Image (cartoon, rainbow, N blue to C red):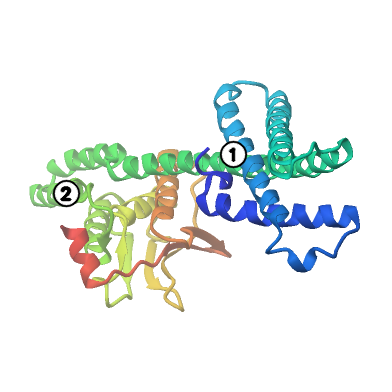
Amino acid sequence: MNRLFIHQLVFRILSAPIVGVMVYLLILLINNDFTELKDIFSSAEVYVCIGLAYLSLESMRLTLSLSEKWLSRQVLKRRITLQIVGTLLISLSLIILAIWAYYKWVIGFTINASELSIFVSIYGVIGLLYNALFFSNFYLNRENTRIIQQEKKLREKLDADFISFKNEINPDLLYESLENLILTLQHNADQAEEQIDYLAGIYRYSLINRHKELISLEEELYAADHLIKLLNYKYQNQLNLLNSIRDTKSIYLIPGSMLVTIDAIVRNTLISKKSPLVVRIYLEEGDEYLVLQHTINDRLLLHQESLHAFARLQRSYSFFSENPFVQVKAGKENYIKFPLMRITADETQTIHD
């Protein structure tokens, strides 16, 4: 309730004088007596109208505040009706009492019915307008609250996806690597040792950086190189990662971005000696996106877990950039575009701390 405009001090101070002067002008218009218009600032009646306006507006404000607590569980239509009737009855009763007292004790005679009806009619209309302003602001406030709650829930979902993505361990990669390792141990112990080093490097990288929000492209490419070398034992060196970016230290990604993306590409692409997989990394013209490009050669049955991980990665990037993480398929080429994030030296220090 305190967020509504009727409770703001500036509105409460300025609204009554404006309303009071308008009421005074309306009374002059109704009585067809503009001779007193030149004396508006010296006329006692205008100050009486301002006082009555304060009484009317404040009584309605207090009535709405109290009824808000008592009627909060009522059906909205019933609540609106009761609040409008209640504010008008209380404010108009006080107005009638105040006018009667003013005429009785200050002017010295009783106000007639026609004059009283003018005051009641004008302040009744003001009461309706005041309620209209209150409920329009109330509805706007409620709609904004609903939108904020929706955004909060969406944010919480994205946050959960983000945490899930960062803490995710790829079991398929682990099991497949162990299977390849078993086969390699039977023929070449040195190659088996290399595979263990690459596999350990990938998971060590994931564990060390899982609490970081961003990490440099240089470190991501280092981990991605380990992944390519590990997968090449299975695909007989048919995987290649070509990087044309020189300054990889100033570009930042979510930890694991390259690993998840390359893993999704490899698992959903047919790879052979005649159709090797070449993934190119470069900056899009205009330096708005980091692009991974490869030729499309989709499998008949796609690997769903890798696609789910890739989708979580897409949602996670909405935390850090207004530009979307996008995948564009044009002709025979697939373009995966990471929104470019460059970080200053101070921000870099904050991330590492």
Q: Compared to 289, does 56 lie above or below?
A: above
- Label 2: state its secondary structure: helix
Q: Is residue 33 left or right of residue 128?
A: right
The residue sitting at 74% across, 41% down in the picture is 108
Q: Is residue 208 left or right of residue 94?
A: left
Q: Is residue 127 left or right of residue 269?
A: right
Instruction: Read off the residue under disc 2.
Output: 208
Q: Which of the marked residues, 1 or 2, is nearer the chain's N terminus?
A: 1
Quadrant occupied by the C terminus: bottom left
Q: Which mark is residue 156?
A: none
Q: Horizontal and vertical percent for residue 93?
A: 71, 30
Residue 46 placement: quadrant:
bottom right
Q: Amino acid at mark 1?
A: Arg
- Label 1: state its secondary structure: helix
The residue sitting at 44% across, 54% down in the picture is 318
Nearest the camera: 324 or 277? Answer: 324
Mark 1 to mark 2 CA distance (whole Å): 44 Å
Q: Amino acid at mark 2?
A: Ile
Badge 2: few (under 14), some or many (20 or more) residues near its Cα, within 10 Å?
few
Nearest the camera: 261 or 113? Answer: 113
Is residue 258 something one can see in this rendering?
yes
Q: Compared to 156, does 322 lie above or below?
A: below
Q: Horizontal and vertical percent for residue 327?
A: 50, 58
Q: Is residue 216 left or right of residue 312?
A: left
Q: Horizontal and vertical percent for residue 152?
A: 46, 41
Residue 279 placement: quadrant:
bottom left
Q: Nearer the viewer, mark 1 or mark 2?
A: 1
Q: Which mark is residue 142?
A: 1
